[in-house]
Amino acid sequence: MRKRGYLTLGAVVLCGALLAGCGSSSSSDGVSSDSGKVAAPAAGGAEPALGEGQAADSTAQGGKDTTAEAPDLRVDQRSIIYTGTITVQVKDVNAAAARITGITSGAGGFIGGDDRQSGAGGADTATMKLRIPATKFDAALKQIGELGEEQSRAINTEDVTEEVVDLDARIAVQQARVDSGRRLLGQAKSLNDLVMLEKEVATRESDLASLQAKKRRLADLTALSTVTVVLLGPTAAPPAPADEPSGFLAGLSSGWNALGDSLTVLLTVLGALLPWLIALGLPAAAVFYLRRRYRRGHPDKELPAPPAEAPATP
């Protein structure tokens, strides 16, 4: 009985110890799970704050880049090429041309071309090409039109703002490439590297010079407008507008003109060769004729002699 009591007491103590161990492990698991739940919101709260800061930085950087790269596209800042043609009938072509020269000089421009032709009975004409600052373009045309009776006027504009902006960007990039190549050239340590870098830098500088030349050309065309002035005397007829046919008539006209041009070239060649044909052909024909006549009058002389017979052998 005592042994059974001891066994029962030992079993009770063992079960109590096992239950206590399970309770402690479960409590520790609960504490760890609770701590995980508490740490998660903190981590979650830190991430939104960091995300907002990054978004703010990216927004600020994006706004800065956009402001730096965006070109000024206002009307007064655009690059526009102005070209115009005006025809005026005046009493004295030379006097009007002199006044146009004064108008151009007063506007800060210059005469790019002056072609004058004299005609009988007041049929003089003059064609002048003017380069006038774009800001004085309209005022100069108005003054030229008031010199006489204006016959016609045509004004064309070409907006090259996008080309200018593109050229500026390409020049900036190419300039950076040239500077980088020059720095590498200064750091070259071998002859092969030096030769290769010199060739690369020369190529980059050539491309940069080409882009800069295009930029200067556009700058010249936008800064100075081109005006073509046609001056007509009192009796000079205005130039007729070109009326070019199209379709079948255009093809027929082109073919006929080509045929006429070909015949003209052929006749020109024959005319150049005819004196040589006469100088050389007539003596050659006379020699040929006399030779044939001589052969007919002396047929025996033309026959070959018969071969000699060989002597008979004994």
Image: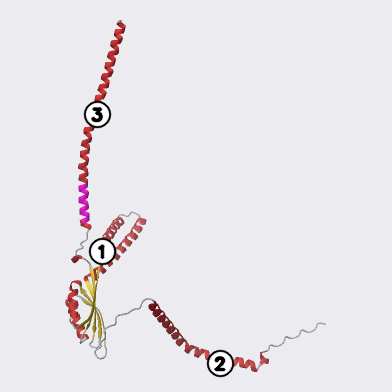
Main secondary structure along the magenta-highlighted residues: helix
**Residue 40 - label:** none
Which residue does the image show at 62% across and 93% down from the upper left?
A: 294
Q: Where does the image place residue 265, in percent across and percent down from the top left?
A: 43, 83
**Span of residues in magenta:** 55-66
**Residue placed furthest toward the right:** 314
Label 2: few (<14), some or many (≥20) within 10 Å? Answer: few
Q: Closest to the observer: 81 or 211?
A: 81
| Earlier sequence position, callout 1 versus callout 3 | 3
> Relative to residue 309, is residue 41 drawn left or right?
left
Which of the image's four quarters has the N terminus?
A: top left
Q: Where does the image place residue 313, in percent across and percent down from the top left?
A: 81, 82
Look at the picture and state if 3 lies above or below 118.
above
Q: Which quarter of the figure has residue 153?
A: bottom left
**Residue 32 - label:** 3
> Relative to residue 240, is residue 281 drawn left or right?
right
Give, as a three-letter code, the residue at label 2. Ala
- Marks 2/1: CA–CA distance: 79 Å
Give, as a three-letter code, the residue at label 1. Glu
**Image color mode:** secondary structure
Q: Closest to the observer: 229 or 33?
A: 33
Residue 64 included in the magenta stretch of the image: yes
In the rendered image, which residue does mark 1 sit on? 162
Q: Closest to the observer: 200 or 69?
A: 69
**Residue placed furthest toward the top:** 1
**Residue placed furthest toward the front:** 248
| Earlier sequence position, callout 3 versus callout 2 | 3
In the rendered image, which residue does mark 2 sit on? 286
